[in-house]
Image: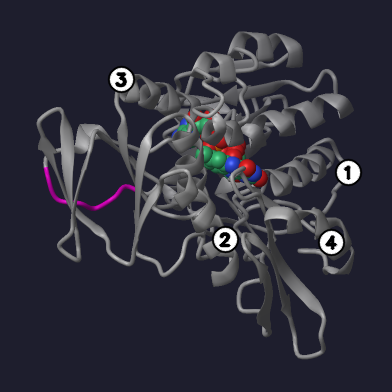
Amino acid sequence: MNSETAPIVVIGTGLAGYNLVKEVRKLAPQQPVLMITTDDGRNYSKPMLSTGFGKNKSADELAMASAADMAEQLNIVIRTNTRVTGIDAAAHKVFIGEEPVAYSKLVLAWGAEAVSPRVEGDAGELIFSINDLQDYARFRDAAAGRKKVLIMGAGLIGAEYANDMASGGFDIDVVAPCEHLLPSLLPAEAAQAVQTGLEGLGVRFHLGPLVTRIVRDGDGVLATLSNGETIAADIVVSAIGLRPRLDLAVKAGLQVGHGVQVNRLLQTSEADIYALGDCAEIEGRVLLYVLPLMASARALAKTLCGTATEVSFGVMPVTVKTPVVPVVVSPPAAGAAGSWQAEVDGVDVQAEFRNENGELLGYALTGARVMNKVALNKELPAVMP
Ligand SMILES: Cc1cc2nc3c(=O)[nH]c(=O)nc-3n(C[C@H](O)[C@H](O)[C@H](O)COP(=O)(O)OP(=O)(O)OC[C@H]3O[C@@H](n4cnc5c(N)ncnc54)[C@H](O)[C@@H]3O)c2cc1C
C-alpha cells in the first residue's frame, strides 16, 4: 500500500483521538481510518475518573462503548493493546515492533503520562497513578476494603481526588510541596476556600514538604516527609503531574518543547504528521483540558479532509470538580503582567487578575461566586483568537 492509498492513522483512542475521528466521519464517510492504542480502546470520559468514588462507579460503569462498538459506529479499524514503537516520517510508516504500517496522514493523539514520584522505599506496588480507565480499575480493586489514603500532589487532579475519595468514605491526607493547593490555577484566597471546604470533609493537608520515603508497614505504608513528619496510610495516590508523551516524537526527529510542537493547523515539523490533545504544544501552549482538544478535533478534521483550517480558542474556563466548594477558573496567560485582587466572603471568593489598564486577563471564582462566570467570560480576551 502506498502512502496515498493508505489510511489516516491515529495513535491514541482517548478523547482527542475519538473526537477527531467523529469529526472526520461527518465530513468524509468513506475515508479509511486506522486507530492504534496501547489500551483496550474503550470510549470513556477521562474527567469522570475523579468523580467515580463519590458516585461509586466501577471502571466498567464509566466506559461508554467498547473498541468493537466504536469501530462499528465509526466504520474504522481499531487495533487495541498495540503500542506504536516507531515512526518513519520520510517513508510515511509507523512501526508496531517490526511491523510497518503505512499512513497517508498520521495523527498523534497519544496523550500525556503521569509523572512518577521519586521516593525511596519498598512500597511501589501500593503507589498508584490514575491516568486512564485501566489505572482506575486497578486502583479501585486495590482500594477495596481500605480506608486511609495518602494523596501526593495538590493540583487539579489531587484536589479532585481528595474531594471524591473523601465523599466516597475514605480518610485522606494530602501532601504537596506548595504553599497552597491548585498553585498553577488559583490565587491564595481562592485556594484557601477550597482547602477549608475539603477540611470540612475531614481531609488533612500537609503543604510545604515533599514525600521522600514510603515503606511497607503491615498491610499498608508509612510515608516520611521532608520535614520529618510521618503518615500511615493503606494506599497512596500519586497526582504529582502529567507530562506530554515525547519519546517517539523525539526519536522520529519531530520538533518538541514541552509537547509535540505544532502550528495552528496542528501540523508538526514533519509533512503529513499532526498532533492534538494532551501531547500537543500549540504555538507554545500545552493545554491539558477537554475544551481545547474538542476545538482542535473540529479544525483538524477539516484540514485532513482537504480544507486547511487553523484552530482558534475562545475563552476556556476550567471547572475544578471539588463540589464541596465549586471552582471555576480562567487563569491568566503564563507571564501576563498584572495582579490579583480578591473579594472573600467565607468560601465564596471572587478573584480577578487585571493589568495596569484595568483589563480583565483572568479570574478565579469559588463557592456561590461561580455564578458570575458568565459575566466575566464576556470581558475576557480569547486564549488564542
Ligand atoms: C483524573 C482527571 C480528571 C480530569 N478532569 C478534567 C476536567 O474536569 N476538565 C477538563 O477539561 N479536563 C480534565 N482532565 C484532562 C482531560 O481528561 C485530558 O485533557 C484529555 O482526556 C486528554 O485526552 P487525550 O486523548 O489527549 O489523551 P489520553 O486520554 O491520555 O489518550 C492517549 C491515548 O494514546 C494511547 N497511546 C499512548 N501512547 C501510545 C503508543 N505508543 N501507541 C499507541 N497508543 C498509544 C493511549 O493508550 C490512549 O488511548 C482530567 C484528567 C484527569 C487525569
Q: Which residue is mark 3?
A: 145
Q: Earlier in the sequence, mark 2 or mark 4?
A: 2
Residue 184: give x, y in percent of width and height: 53, 65
Point out which mark residue 377 bears: 4
Whole-number angstrom distance, CA of label 3 to CA of label 1: 54 Å
User: Of the residues tagged 2 and 3, which is closer to the observer?
Assistant: 2
Q: Earlier in the sequence, mark 4 or mark 1?
A: 1
Q: Tell me which amino acid carries mark 4.
A: Asn
Q: Exactly how many numbered labels are in the figure?
A: 4
Q: Earlier in the sequence, mark 1 or mark 2?
A: 2
- Characterize the magenta stretch by its predominant secondary structure: loop
Left or right, 333 with reference to 171: right
Q: Element type at marker 3?
A: loop
Whole-number angstrom distance, CA of label 2 to CA of label 4: 22 Å
Q: Which residue is mark 2?
A: 193
Q: Residue at x 81, y 45 (%)?
A: 299
